[in-house]
Amino acid sequence: MYTVITAISVWAIPALICFILIYGIIKGLPVYETFVEGAKEGFGTAINIIPHLVGMMVAVSIFRASGALDYLLLFISPVLSLLYIPAEVVPLAIIRPISGAGALAITSDLIAQYGPDSFIGRLASTMQGSTDTTLYVLTVYFGAIGVRKIGYALKVGLLADLAGALAAILIVTIVFG
């Protein structure tokens, strides 16, 4: 199982990029010019999201520095023990929908502490890749284009994050547990 997953993960992204390029060429699209045009639009979007990004980073820093995250972990630790979920990865699952940079810092700390080939290191890496920064996306991108009604997108995004985190726990337990 491990070798199959490794082989797929090595070739998945290069195969996807080749597929997109070949598909564009077959369709007769100007592939390079389309890429450059998309990069120009991306630069403009990056400039528009900076104020929203700063606001989100301040909120995440306050959440962590205030100790609210520690109290939350203390409150849910009995349930985690019953479900055999390592408490070490819960801050990652909580922070990941809020901040990609904060989640990456937690993942890096877990990998540095437990090692990349440990169960917690593999679980943190898989969880990092299987969830998204939902609140960040909603705040920054929806804010940049002026979308104010985000109720359904928030619910679906957070449910997707929960499903990604639970799938990461299940799959890592099956493959590496």
Image: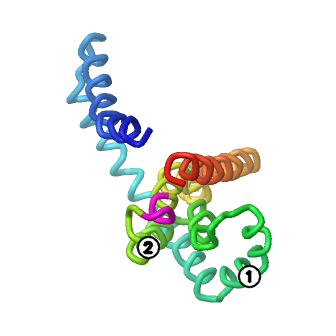
Nearest the camera: 99 or 81? 81
Residue 113 in magenta? no
Nearer the observer: mark 1 or 2; the answer is 2
Mark 2 is surrounded, within 10 Å at the Cα level, by few (under 14), some (14 to 19) or many (20 or more) other residues, namely some
**Residue 20: x percent and y percent?**
32, 24
Amino acid at dot 1: Leu
Q: Relative to 26, does residue 91 appear above or below in the rendering?
A: below
Tell me the residue at 36%/46% (across/down): 42
Mark 1 is surrounded, within 10 Å at the Cα level, by few (under 14), some (14 to 19) or many (20 or more) other residues, namely few
Q: Residue furthest bottom?
A: 66
Q: Relative to 140, does residue 11 appear above or below in the rendering?
A: above
Q: Please, what secondary structure does the residue beneath circle 1 have?
A: helix
The tag on residue 74 is 1
Q: Relative to 121, does residue 70 appear above or below in the rendering?
A: below
Residue 147 in sight from this viewpoint: no
Amino acid at dot 2: Tyr
Q: Main secondary structure of the magenta part?
A: helix
Tell me the residue at 39%/56% (across/down): 46
Q: Which residue is mark 2?
A: 114
Q: Please, what secondary structure does the residue beneath circle 2 have?
A: helix
Would residue 104 be found to the left or right of residue 142 on screen?
Answer: left
Nearest the camera: 146 or 24? 24
| Viewport quadrant of the C terminus | bottom right
Q: Residue furthest left?
A: 32
**Residue 131: x percent and y percent?**
56, 52
Labels 1 & 2 near each other (Cβ < 8 A): no
For marks 1 and 2, the one nearer the N-term is 1
Would residue 139 be found to the left or right of residue 13 on screen?
Answer: right
**Residue 58: x percent and y percent?**
54, 78
The residue segment tinted magenta is 118-122
| Viewport quadrant of the N terminus | top left
